[in-house]
Amino acid sequence: QVQLVESGGGLVQAGGSLRLSCAASGRTASRYVMGWFRQAPGEEREFVAAISWSGGSTSYADSVKGRFTMSRDNGKNTVYLQMNSLKPEDTAVYYCGAGVAGTYDYWGQGTQVTVSS
């Protein structure tokens, strides 16, 4: 069992930055692939970024490439999403997920990110 708790969301102006954190608990949390997803009102949840358990491999949605960076610190069982050059269309609830083989089995409660124009 893995528990995930996101933090770091908030209100920021367009062009600004935020860093989201996701703290994982559970003995094997560091062995999971971790991902960030987001869901805007009235929209489906969409993939944002993912990182391998070692941190050596990352992938990003085209909409955030070059602006967002995902990292992890397995010693702290925490993953991060550094978000720069934020746009109003980045406004959403951001969720952290953990899983294996492309399937995310565990989710956090989400953190709200609002980007004003």
Image (cartoon, rainbow, N blue to C red):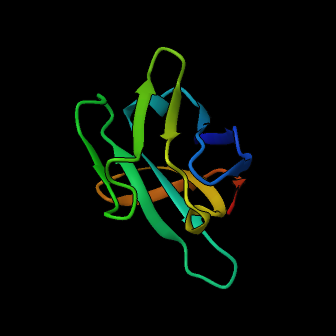
Question: Would you identify the image quadrant in which residue 107 lies?
Answer: bottom right
Measured along the vertical axis of the image, is residue 75 above or below residue 1? above
Residue 34 at what x, y percent from top left?
43, 44
Residue 27 at what x, y percent from top left?
53, 26
Q: Residue furthest left?
A: 57
Q: Name the residue: 51% across, 59% down.
A: 37
Q: Quadrant of the N terminus?
A: top right
Left or right: residue 3 compared with residue 15: right
The residue closer to the viewer here, 102 or 43, is 43
Question: Would you identify the image quadrant in which residue 2 lies?
Answer: top right
Q: Name the residue: 40% across, 39% down.
A: 69
Q: Residue furthest top?
A: 75
The residue closer to the viewer here, 50 or 97, is 50
Question: Would you identify the image quadrant in which residue 117 lies?
Answer: bottom right
Measured along the vertical axis of the image, is residue 101 above or below residue 76? below
Left or right: residue 96 compared with residue 60: right
Residue 96 at what x, y percent from top left?
56, 49
Q: Name the residue: 65% across, 64% down.
A: 92
Q: How many marks?
A: 0
Residue 97 at what x, y percent from top left?
52, 51
Q: Name the residue: 34% across, 61% down.
A: 61
